[in-house]
Image: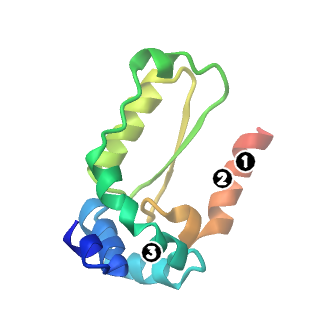
Amino acid sequence: QDAVDAGRYEDAVELMVREVLHMPEEEIAALKELPSWPSRVATAPTLPREESTPLVIGDDELAAVQIPTLIIQGGDSPKFLRDAVGTVADRVVGAQVVTLEGHQHVADQVDPEMFANVVLDFLLD
């Protein structure tokens, strides 16, 4: 919150990915090189609100999902994210979980070709 209040938006985003997502420095550096980084920084004022609002989807809502569902997780993602994937996968009937070893939460941006291939394999199966 302090970084956002002080207008230090890039610092706020870096702090969030480092402290909340536990992203390693090399992945943060790669993220900052992406064309999407300026947009990510521009949305920094929303971070305090987003972090203070729990995302709660009920078991009934998850059980009601009736379409093939792919859940992709980074093998190196923080435990709380992997736990959330497990919870969702347990409740969405037939959900397929793919773990991207060596990646974290932003694998789609750090290695978009690999990520796209995983999605295409699922869609074409």
Picture layout, residue 16 above or below residue 67? below
Whole-angstrom CA distance, mark 3 to mark 2, is 28 Å
Its colouring scheme is: rainbow
Regarding residue 23, the answer to whether it shows in the image is no
Helix, strand or loop at mark 3:
helix
Q: Quadrant of the C terminus?
A: top right
Residue 1: x percent and y percent?
23, 65
Mark 3 or mark 1: which is in front? 3
Whole-angstrom CA distance, mark 3 to mark 1, is 32 Å
Crowd class of label 1 (few under 14; some 14 to 19; many from 20; radius 10 Å): few
Q: Residue furthest right?
A: 124
- Asked which quadrant contains residue 22, the reply is bottom left
- Give the side of residue 108 with respect to residue 28, left or right: right
> Residue tagged by mark 1?
121
Instruction: Judge by depth and name the residue closer to the eye, 72 or 48.
Output: 48
Pointer 1 with pointer 2, Cβ within 8 A: yes
Mark 3 and mark 2 lie on one chain; the one further toward the N terminus is 3
At a point 25% along the width and 72% down the height, the residue shown is: 5
> Residue tagged by mark 3?
41
Whole-angstrom CA distance, mark 1 to mark 2, is 5 Å
Crowd class of label 3 (few under 14; some 14 to 19; many from 20; radius 10 Å): some
Q: At label 2, which amino acid type do we have?
A: Val
Q: At label 3, which amino acid type do we have?
A: Val
Q: At label 1, which amino acid type do we have?
A: Asp
At a point 39% along the width and 77% down the height, the residue shown is: 28
Instruction: Judge by depth and name the residue closer to the eye, 30 or 4.
Output: 4
Picture layout, residue 97 above or below residue 56? below
Residue 117: x percent and y percent?
70, 57
